[in-house]
Amino acid sequence: MSKKMKLAALLVAGGLVASLAACSTDDGGSGGGGGDAAAGGDCNVGISMPTRSLERWINDGEGLQSQLEEADCTVDLQYADNRTEQQISQIQNQVAGGATVLVVAAIDGQTLGPVLEEAKGQDVTVIAYDRLINGTPDVDYYATFDNYQVGQLQGQYIEEQLDLASGAGPFNLEPFAGSPDDNNARFFFEGAWDVLLPYVEAGQLVVPSGQSPASADDWAEIGILGWGSDDAQSEMDNRLSSFYTGDEKVDVVLSPNDSLALGIEASLSSAGYEPGTDWPIITGQDADVANVQAILNDEQSMTVWKDTRALGDRVFQMIQSIVAGDEVEVNDTETYDNGEKVVPSYLLDPEVVVKDDVQTKLVDSGFLSASDVGL
Ligand code: BGC
């Protein structure tokens, strides 16, 4: 079946034959932002991603773009260099260019209200991608992995590895949290801290640096703005040089994601820690290539894998439903209150990857190639 026929079948199934003419305008391709937006049912999608500096966003954006283009949608994919102003103006251009659906992974989840209000004025349907957009009624759907569960998996991994449930300890823990402007970071920390805080309170986990939020609500105190590896590295350098004098050693680091884990690992390495001897347990998230290599080299213990292809598929299905005028499938209508409304969400399940899983979960599924990670 040709691409146009595939999309025609979809639209006929959705009972919206009238929209076919608009949807099949063959001006697909990134950067165009064209298409016949005036017609109802037009499949013209603006994708706004935060940055190219992190592998996962490149995979997310390009994966979704090619799926949509396969279905003859017009797609404008933009990356905003982690700069909010840039993201806002890119979204404005996408709306001006005729986007009928916006897929936005926000840099700062608090600041997109005004631009989304403009989008709503043009009847654009807005999907928050991976990160919730707060403080606005103008976000229609949210598609993500279960962010709380990501943190919970990290906390449970630490609990199991250290045998905390049996009373083992004390162990030296250094916790980190993600970017304070990213709504996900709170959920990641909460998920982990709900598991770990009781052990901190019981004295089985000790935080020599004192960077230990009294409750999960205080997570932003230890957040690394912008999720930068370099900033995580400097923070870890400071903690190591100020609080780990003499024989004191770090036993475990709660890192919410792979970019922070990379910086923390660089810091440990320059402080003389060695894999296989005194290297601490370190968590992560995303299964970035460099971190999977670190897992294979015993420099990182685990990562929480979020198969970005599955998220792309889910958003693609949402867009298909929106274009066809069908009901959009969601599986959570309670968790993600953005301050203005509870945003109907579709949550996917993340999963833990350790050294033994790299081949079976990441390589065999085609997420990474064996040569990428040196297998
Ligand atoms: C994403 C993570 C990512 C982090 C830094 C979060 O919002 O959910 O997968 O590691 O941002 O980009």
Image (cartoon, grey):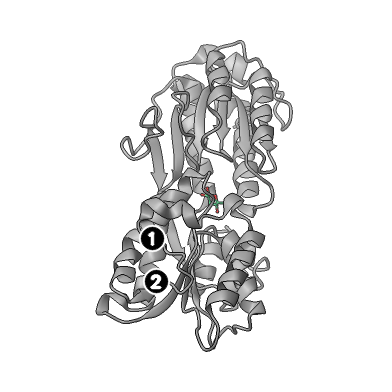
Q: In screen coordinates, is 267 left or right of 209?
A: right
Q: Are marks 1 and 2 in contact (CB under 8 Å)?
A: yes
Q: Categorize mark 1 by other alpha carbons within 10 Å: few (<14), some (14-19), many (20+).
A: many
Q: Residue at x 29, y 66 (%)?
A: 198
Q: Quadrant of residue 350?
A: bottom left
- The kind of secondary structure element at disc 1 is helix
Q: In screen coordinates, is 176 left or right of 343?
A: right
Q: In screen coordinates, is 333 left or right of 16?
A: left
User: Which residue, given by chain and number where applicable, does mark 2 sit on?
Assistant: 158
Q: Residue at x 43, y 72 (%)?
A: 207
Q: Quadrant of the C terminus?
A: bottom right
Amino acid at circle 1: Ala
Q: Which mark is residue 368?
A: none
In depth, the one of 139 and 375 nearer the eye is 139
User: Which residue, given by chain and number where applicable, does mark 1 sit on?
Assistant: 192
Residue 371 at what x, y percent from top left? 68, 68
Between the residue at mark 1 and the residue at mark 2, the CA separation in whole angstroms equals 9 Å
Q: Quadrant of residue 266?
A: bottom right
Figure check: 333 above or below 172: above
Q: Is residue 291 visible?
A: no
- The kind of secondary structure element at disc 2 is helix
Is the CB of the residue bearing disc 1 within 8 angstroms of ligand 1?
no
